[in-house]
Image (cartoon, rainbow, N blue to C red):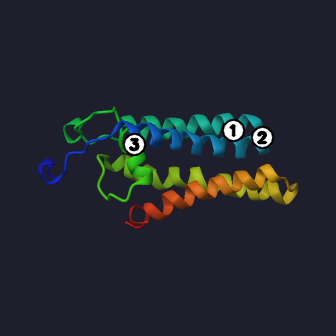
Amino acid sequence: MSTQNRKIIDYSKFELVFGTLAIILWIMLGAVSFAIVYPLAGLAYASLLAFLIFYEMGKHGCVTCYLCRTCTIGMGKLPGFFFKKEGKTNVNRKAQRIFPFVLVLLSVVPAVLVVLSIIQELAVYKIALLAAILAFSLCSGIVRRKTLVT
């Protein structure tokens, strides 16, 4: 597809800051779910996902800066990739292939760990953690279901 067929994207500061903070919070929720089972696993999980999302999908996932009116070195497209209905973002195929894997790591794996932890010992904070993980997962999954299917 040529660059003339794509629309030029303009990222707002609100979208950039709020979306990036939401992704960081989502990573931290998953890290806490891993830390419940094994504390060092939470640190490794947060490091892996920060690398995959902010470096691989963000910085190296750009098609070209020519398509973005406000270049944010990949950080602008991430909130759009996770939380917007727009089908086309300025990401390459590598980032599109990594996205389902990252989404499973962000939502399914932490939710399963929290459920297993709840089975072992019921606690209010674990239920709140599970609800928060599921809320982020459902928000992103419902908005991005077309991307996940195609």
Identified at 60% across, 57% down, the residue is: 135
Say which amino acid is labelled 2. Tyr
Find out whether the residues at labels 3 and 2 contact each other: C-beta distance under 8 Å: no
Say which amino acid is labelled 3. Glu
Find out whether the residues at labels 2 and 1 contact each other: C-beta distance under 8 Å: yes
Q: Is residue 37 left or right of residue 59?
A: right
Viewer-side residue, 65 vs 86: 86
Identified at 78% across, 40% down, the residue is: 38
Distance (Cα) linking label 2 and label 1: 7 Å
Which of label 3 and label 2 is nearer to you?
3
- Outermost residue, left direction? 4
**How many residues crowd around disc 1 within 10 Å: few (fewer than 14), some, or many (20 or more)?**
many
Q: Earlier in the sequence, mark 3 or mark 2?
A: 3
The residue that disc 1 covers is 42
Identified at 19% across, 50% down, the residue is: 7
Residue 34 pos. (x, y %): 71, 44
The quadrant where residue 131 appears: bottom right
The quadrant where residue 16 appears: top left
**Helix, strand, or loop for circle 2?**
loop
Identified at 39% across, 50% down, the residue is: 81
Distance (Cα) linking label 1 and label 3: 27 Å
Say which amino acid is labelled 1. Gly
**The C terminus: image quadrant:** bottom left
The residue that disc 3 covers is 15
